[in-house]
Amino acid sequence: MILRNDSAQARVTARERKWNFFYRGAPILSASARYPEVAVPASPRAQRAINGRIRSQVAAFYRYAAGPLYRQAAADWRFAQANDTPFHPYEAILNYETALNCGGYLSLFRDRYEYTGGAHGSTVRSSDTWALQSGRRLPLAAFFRRGEDWRGRVLAQILKQADEAMRQNPGIYFDDYRERIETYFDPANFYLTPSGIAVYFQQYEIAPYSSGIVVFTVSGDTEPSCGGR
């Protein structure tokens, strides 16, 4: 395995914004965003690129909450009033986590949770991995040797882990989990951790709701060199 020796790190400060939405005086939706503000003294270009993308993501989340989700909540509130049924206020949460910040890389994932009055809410995960020197957002292929069948290598590791997990805990995945892993594997759905490359699958893609977002940790050829590894 090739390890990077660049010890660059970003300074990450947590920020939070909250919004409450009303319809005809009734609270129908609450939304919040917990997100990082990143400082990269060694690379102002990287700092601008990372913070610009985060701000854009938070702004898009707000527009979604204030637009389509608000209209849906208002329609449900009107229906509940007309039919004398309970209305459960909607909730939307955007939460960022720093998965890795060392070795010249910053890797973030963000979970967008929504509750729209059903039995339970739903969560969708997204992620970004950055080279702190250049400010370039890196694809999964960047962590494997050029020309290698990295997709096949990643899938082989995931399938091996899934087979073992299913053997130890039958029912943790859907019966056709192998086919679903092949179908739903998305190279954009990854982030770096001190243990390796985390590849994730969204809720219901390969497993029932109770299994949540399923994460596999795989190895590549180029990974950050972090203290304590």
Image (cartoon, rainbow, N blue to C red):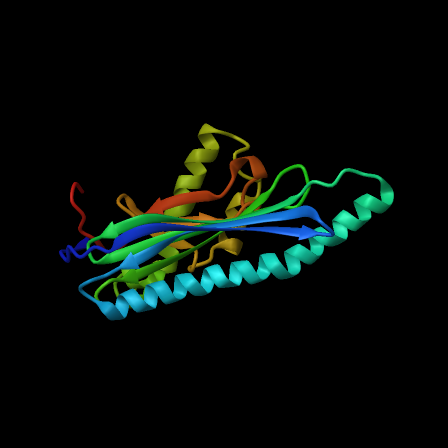
- Image quadrant for the C terminus? top left
Quarter of the view holding residue 43: bottom left
Residue 149 in view of the camera: no
> Is residue 171 rendered to the left or right of residue 82?
left
Residue 116 in view of the camera: yes
**Residue 49 placement (x, y as % from top left):** 33, 68
**Residue 121 placement (x, y as % from top left):** 60, 42
Quarter of the view holding residue 85: top right
Q: Report the residue that reaches farthest toward the front.
A: 25
Between 21 and 116, the one lying in front of the other is: 21
Q: How many marks?
A: 0
**Residue in the image at 63% along x and 48% along y:** 29
Q: Is residue 179 above or below residue 88?
A: below
**Residue in the image at 86% along x and 46% along y:** 82
Between 126 and 178, the one lying in front of the other is: 126
Quarter of the view holding residue 138: bottom left
Q: Report the residue that reaches farthest toward the right.
A: 83
**Residue 46 placement (x, y as % from top left):** 27, 67
**Residue 205 placement (x, y as % from top left):** 55, 48
> Is residue 225 rendered to the left or right of residue 171?
left
Between 19 and 85, the one lying in front of the other is: 19
> Is residue 7 rendered to the left or right of residue 36?
left
Between 18 and 124, the one lying in front of the other is: 18
> Is residue 54 rendered to the left or right of residue 228?
right
**Residue in the image at 17% along x and 57% along y:** 8
